[in-house]
Amino acid sequence: MPSEPLSKKRIVTAAIGLIEREGADAISMRRIAAELGVGVMSLYNHVPNKDALLSEVAEAVLSEIEFTDDPGADWTERVRIQARAFRQIAHHYPRSTMLVVSRQLHSNAGLLPVERALATLRSAGFDGPEAVKVLRMFIAFIVGSLLREVGVTPSFAPLPARMRAERVDAALFPTVASLAPLLDSCDPEEEFDFGVELLIQAMAVHRKRAPGAPDALSGAAAPSPERLS
Amino acid sequence: MPSEPLSKKRIVTAAIGLIEREGADAISMRRIAAELGVGVMSLYNHVPNKDALLSEVAEAVLSEIEFTDDPGADWTERVRIQARAFRQIAHHYPRSTMLVVSRQLHSNAGLLPVERALATLRSAGFDGPEAVKVLRMFIAFIVGSLLREVGVTPSFAPLPARMRAERVDAALFPTVASLAPLLDSCDPEEEFDFGVELLIQAMAVHRKRAPGAPDALSGAAAPSPERLS
DNA sequence: CAGACATACGTACGGTGTACGTCCCCCTGG
DNA sequence: CCAGGGGGACGTACACCGTACGTATGTCTG
C-alpha cells in the first residue's frame, strides 16, 4: 500500500520538518527514513549521500523566498524588501537556516536572489564591479545577522541568555559591564532594520554617478537621515 | 613514560592541529586521543564532552587575536585595525574559524574583543545604544565575510569554483551572466577592506554629535571619499 | 604503612553513514 | 501471453562515533 512513491522532494520535505521540529543535530538518515515509514537504504535511491541531502534542504529553503519585486519602486525600497525577504524565511525555517548560511551552494536555486539583487543594483546606477562588491557586503551582513539571530535561539528558547549582567567582571570589562543591559536585551528586527538602513545609506553615498544613469533616483539616493532609528 | 601529564590545554591544542590539518569533519575524540598517544576516555578527565571541547577550541582561537590598540589613534583607524585582527586569525586558523562563527560563546574569551570595540566606539563619541547597535552590525558583517572566505576554501582549495560563467543560463539570469567574470574572481582582502571602509563611513555619517563630545574627531568622522576603493 | 583520591585506560552500548546483495514489481519485446 | 530486464525498496554488515561505567595505578595525606 504505497501511499506515495517516495521522491527526492518527499525526502527533503521530511528532512526539513524533522530539522525544524527536533533540531539540526537530531537529523539522521535513519530518522528521516522512519519519518517516511521507509527503509533507510531506500533514501539512497534518490539522494547520493547525506551531505547532498542537506544541500538540497538548503536549496529548498532558499527557493521558498518570495520576491515581490516592484521594478518601478525606489531602489532603496527594493533593497529593503529583498533583505527582509531573507529574514522572513530565516524566521520561517529557523533551524534549517543554519544549513543555508553555513554551506555555499553551487546550484541555481541560490542564484535567483543574486540575479534579483544585481538587477536592482544595476538599475539603481551601480556599475558592475560596484554592484558585485556591494552585494557581497550586503550578503555578508545578512548572513552574519541571521546566524546570530537563529543561533541565539537554538530551540526558539524563550529565555535567551540573561547571564551577562551579573557574570562580567566590571574591572576587566568596564565598558561591557556598563552597557550590559543593552547587550542583554536585543530586538532582532530593529537591529536588522538598523543595519539595512545604515548599509543603504552607505551605498547611496558611495554610489558613483554614472554619466547616463537615470536621474530620477537622486532623491532616493539620499534618504532622510531620520530613517535611521 | 608520560611525556607530559595531559591537560586541557594539550587536548585543545591537539584538536586545533587536527582540525587545521584534516578539516573540522575529521575531528573525533578517538582521533584526538590517538594524536596525543593516549586512551580515548582519558580525555574525559579534562573535558566534559565533545561539544565543550569544541567550544574550548573556539575560545582558544578567539583568544589568540592580537590587539595592538592605540588609544591615541584616530577611531576610524582603531576600528580598521580591530576588524583586520579578526580576519587575521581567520586566515591563521581557517578551518577552526567555522567553529568560532557558528557557535556563540558564553565565556570571557569572547568578551575581550567586545570590550575593546565598545570602548573604541564610546571614545569616538557614540552613545551606549548606538555603540551596541553599530558593533552588532560590524560583527555581523565580519562573521558573514569570514564565513564566505573560509567556506569558499574548504581545504584551502587552489581551484575555487570556476563553474559559474559557463553554467548559468543567460536567459534566466541575465545580470548574473553578464557579471559572471566579476562574480567568479574575488579578491577577499579587497572585498573585506571595501566593506570595512563602507561601514566606517556609514558609521561616521550616522554618529550623532554628542553635545560635550570631543571635537578633535570631526576630521576623522568624514574620511576622504577616495578611501573607498 | 593505610587509605583516599585523581588520573589513565579498556570494555561495552547504542547510534551513525553507507557499501553491497537480494527481492519484487512493472514495463517492454517478442 | 510470456521472458527478461531494469529500477526501486529493503536487510544485513561494517567501520566509526560519543560516552557511561568499572577498573587499575600512581601519588599524596594522616
Image: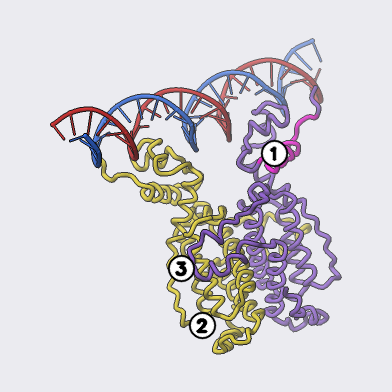
Chain colours: A yellow, B purple, C blue, D red
Q: Residue under mark 2: which chain is it in?
A: A
Residue A166 image position (x, y, % from top left): 67, 56
Q: How many marks?
A: 3
Residue ID for mark 3 = B171
The three-letter code of the residue at mark 3 reads: Ala
Measured Cα–Cα span from mark 1 to mark 3: 45 Å
User: To which quarter of the image does residue B48 belong?
Assistant: top right
Q: Nearer the viewer, residue A189 or B77?
A: B77
Residue C22 horizontal/vertical position (percent): 34, 24
Q: Height in image: B82 above or below B51?
A: below
Which mark identifies residue B96?
A: none
Determine which residue is flagged by label 2.
Answer: A74
> What residue is disc 1 on?
B18
Q: Which span of residues is magenta-colored?
A: B4-22
User: Residues at marks 2 and 3, common chain?
Assistant: no
For mark 3, give the secondary structure: loop
Q: Is residue B15 magenta?
A: yes
What's the residue at 47%, 65% (across, down)?
A88
Q: Residue at 68% across / 66% down in the picture?
A: B191
